[in-house]
Amino acid sequence: MSYFKGLLAAAVVCSLVGPATAATLIDPLTNNGSFEFAGGAINTTKIQVWDTGALDVDNWVEWAGVSTAGDDSGVENTGNASDGTMVAFLQPGNAVHNMTSYVAAEGDEFYFSWDHVLRGDRDHTVSLVYDNGGTITSLVPSEKASTGVIETISNTYVIPSGSPAIGKTIGLGIVSPGSYPEIDNFILTVNELAPVDGDVDGDFDVDLDDYAIIRDNFRLSPATKAQGDITGGDIVDLADFLFWRNAHAAASGAASAGIPEPASAALALLGAVAFATLRKRR
């Protein structure tokens, strides 16, 4: 079996994807997801402001630059809570956010949900938000609007390549254009993809796309990981191909699918470089 046919056969057999690790960022016991805490302690008192005075609502902050009304919004016990005793209420124009310390990365899968506990003309929107140099900014594609009925509302969003949220801390934001929605029990979790050995292009798998980068940049120096230097030698060479080859073969059955031996790999890579050089001279 030829070198390139061997690679193709191996790629069909496996595309090794990194495992995901789950973490809870907001829930009733984490970051005050059900509005039970104020001033660092359990609260049973109605609070009509989010973050001023001795009884600040823990973790929730009025959203500067987005909120247009804030003098009659906060938490209270209305008997409608879905978790604990307190719910949040927001007057028309009010907006708040709850930031975590988690830093977003490409491929992170976020899940968030909350309970809309009082029906009526009480529209509101929830989204992922990120800290953009001190300005809390909505990750617009993640926005999820209420439907005006009592229900649990949820959404899932995966951070794509090039997202402005990459490298920024993440949280949840609420915007209320409607009339005093009562909401409760916010949950935010993330499935974080672990780095994958042999992944050159950063898409969390090991496949022919990664090999193509190594092939096209063979002998490039200095070089970065994104250019194919996955061994840290500051050059794209046979060691990088072998690292990719071994990572690819780690999936079950890949080793017997025709991945070439090192000698064949070297000849093929050198041949690719020679061919590219010849084309340039023409």
Image: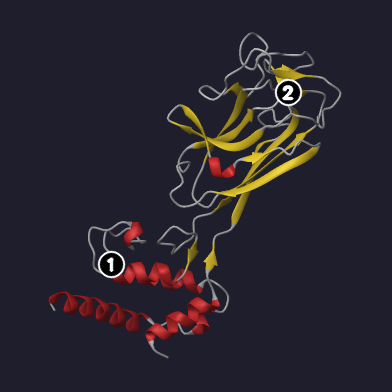
Given the current orientation, which residue lies at the most extreme right position? Answer: 79
Disc 2 residue type (three-letter): Tyr
Reading the image, the residue beneath label 2 is 180
Given the current orientation, which residue lies at the most extreme left position? Answer: 281
Given the current orientation, which residue lies at the most extreme front position? Answer: 121
Q: Please state, as top left, top right, bottom left or bottom right, where the C terminus lies in the image.
A: bottom left
Q: Quadrant of residue 54?
A: top right
Q: Position of residue 109 (x, y in %)?
A: 59, 50
Q: Quadrant of residue 232?
A: bottom left
In the image, 272 versus 163, the foreground residue is 163
Q: Mark 1: give few (<14), some (14-19) or many (20+) Cα within 10 Å.
A: some
Q: Residue, x 73% and y 23% (percent of image)?
A: 180
Q: Residue, x 42% and y 30% (percent of image)?
A: 133
Q: Residue, x 74% and y 29% (percent of image)?
A: 122
Q: Secondary structure at mark 2?
A: loop
Q: Is residue 37 left or right of residue 22?
A: right
The numbered disc on residue 217 is 1
Decide if residue 191 is in sight here.
Answer: no
Given the current orientation, which residue lies at the most extreme top position? Answer: 53
Q: Position of residue 193 (x, y in %)?
A: 55, 53
How far apart marks 2 and 1 lie (CA) works out to 59 Å
Tell me which label, 2 or 1, sits earlier in the chain. 2
Decide if residue 63 is in sight here.
Answer: yes
In the image, 92 versus 237, the foreground residue is 92
Q: Look at the picture and state if 80 lies above or below 277.
A: above
